[in-house]
Image: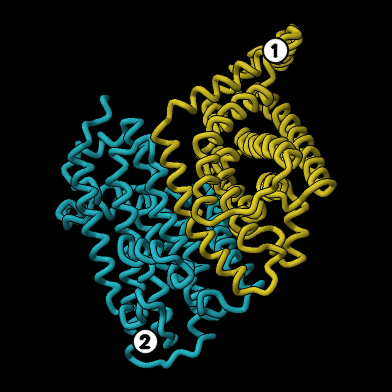
Chain colours: A cyan, B yellow
Amino acid sequence: MAEPDSARVVAGTWFTPYLAVLRSRVKAQQVYRLSFATEVFSAFLIGLVEFAEVWVIFHNVKTLGGLDVDAALLLFGLSNTSFALAQVAVGHLDSLPSMIRMGTLDAYHLRPQPLLLQLVTSDISLRRLARAAVAVIVLGIGLWRNDIDWGIAPVTLIVITLISGIALFCGLFVCAAGLQFFLIDGAELTNSFTYGGSFAAMQPASVFPTPLKLLFGFAIPVAFTAYVPTIALLGLPGPPLLPAWSAWLTPLAAAWVWLLASAAWRVGTRHYQGGGG
Amino acid sequence: MRGNVAGDGGLAFAVRRRRKPGAFRVYWTLARAGFKRQAQYKLAMFAGLFTNCVFGFVRAAVMVAAVRAAGDFGGYDEGTIGAYVWLSQALLGATQFMGPQIDLVDRIKTGDVAIDFLRPIDVQLGYLATDMGRAACTFLPRGVPSIAIGAATFGLSMPSTPVAYLLGLISVLLAVALSFLCLFAVALIGFWVVEIRGIRVLYQIVGTFLAGLFVPVHMFPDWLRVVAMSTPFPSILQAPIDTLSGRAAGTDALIIVVLQGFWVLVIGLLGRVLLRAGQRRLEVQGG
């Protein structure tokens, strides 16, 4: 009787093993309830504190870089929702340097599946959803409080922005992971564009001096995850380098980051010689 | 069993009692070892400096814009807000808010900490000395260049009297010690709970915010400033920035330094109490 069942499991799709791992991860995180609860609470507080930073600045100024407090809510909501969700999916790639150092990465190499896909599914952090929740709530408030000319175009733009934003930040994490193969001691270097990128994405890019505008507008185009869409949604002109209409180019920005990411990942994994175990 | 525990405790105590007057030299050696160990990680230092600078540029751009937009931004002008941003970036490596967890966390988890208890030096002071050495080694290659880069790009206003720098230096030393003692106390929670990752992240995020890393504590609304000032966190970052940048001078600076000393004593004592309790618990577990 049980045979057909197990046969069906064996004959799953290519994704079945990953699904099994993901399911076990989700279960494992719920076993130590107290630990899980404090981690969820911490993640929630991270979101709250990040929001408090923005809030304290706008407690002291009326407008910053042409944005008022309502616009800042939208900016924060867009950038942080994308970043937090990307972190849920691939944020644990951060631990790659310690996996390389401890030699645990070699075990993944032995399995007949793509390394990146294995690593991505190796640890999905549910606690980080709490941080994303704060961002989504702020985004909701931002969309409600601002005077947006609702129609097909803004809704489409928001959806495109969120999908591209998540993809873009995921790409940055993969890019960082690829570089870790070279930078075992200097892993902190990549924080400058993962966490630094997320931090820069929360700011109105109009206050940046030109070099920073070029850096976060084109080289590591995090300005497209929130600032450019925000000014487009609000009908603001935006600075000369980042005009409002370019908000529609956000998928292009994500594609550019993924081009960098796949190059970094390929070069990194080729360079990797094993942990010497 | 119980007698055995008391016996071990007594032995450890006896060993500690035999400490020679030259104890200071032991801690000095530990501090130098901490310095040397940190000096091995050249790429890490460069990475830290680079990341500090990227964050510094973004934060400085935002803060300068905020100062320009607001009529009065907590008494800050473009020069002093620049000094605040770049000094805070410079101090980050030494105060280790963002750093990896301290070794002690793993040693408690694996039980290796039992060996630390048997050594003829004080566990807390020993770790503190090592960390002061480590911090010194981050301040020179990471902190000083951060300030220099900030000064070159933003033009910081810094004090001109030697007294300000002397007080600033004392303030930085107290801040580094306090930061470590806090991390030490957090690590000791590991005696009671298996996984302290959540608690550490909590400490890191609430601590950096209340310490004034993202926005100066002076800019907080009144109630939040009261909350912040009732914690040791502003003494870790805002205090050394204020004394070193000359925002607080003379008696004000002296009060800040005394307050830092107060927190060092309080958190240091808390650490000792937790360490004692943890030691008892560890011995009961390990037999």
Apparent side of residue B227 relative to residue A53 in the rendered image (left or right): right
The label shown at residue B12 is 1
Q: Please identify the residue farthest to the front as the structure is shown.
A: B160
**Front position among marks 2 and 1:** 2
Q: Residue at x 26, y 72 (%)?
A: A251
- B106 over B263 or under it: above or below: above
Which quadrant holds residue A44? Answer: bottom right
**Callouts 2 and 1 close, C-beta under 8 Å:** no
Asked whether A164 or B200 is in front, the reply is A164
Which image quarter holds the C terminus of chain A? top left
Amino acid on which the number 2 mark rests in the picture: Pro
Q: Residue A26's spot in the image, x, y percent? A: 40, 54
Q: Residue at x 29, y 52 (%)?
A: A175
- B24 over B125 or under it: above or below: above
> Pointer 2 indicates a residue of which chain?
A
Cα–Cα gap, marks 2 and 1: 70 Å
On the question of residue A25 being in view, the answer is no
Which image quarter holds the N terminus of chain A? bottom left
Q: Please identify the residue farthest to the right as the structure is shown.
A: B251
Asked whether B104 or B287 is in front, the reply is B104
Kindly state the secondary structure of the residue where label 2 is placed.
Answer: helix
> Pointer 1 indicates a residue of which chain?
B
- A250 over B204 or under it: above or below: below
Asked whether B8 or A108 is in front, the reply is A108
- B242 over B173 or under it: above or below: below
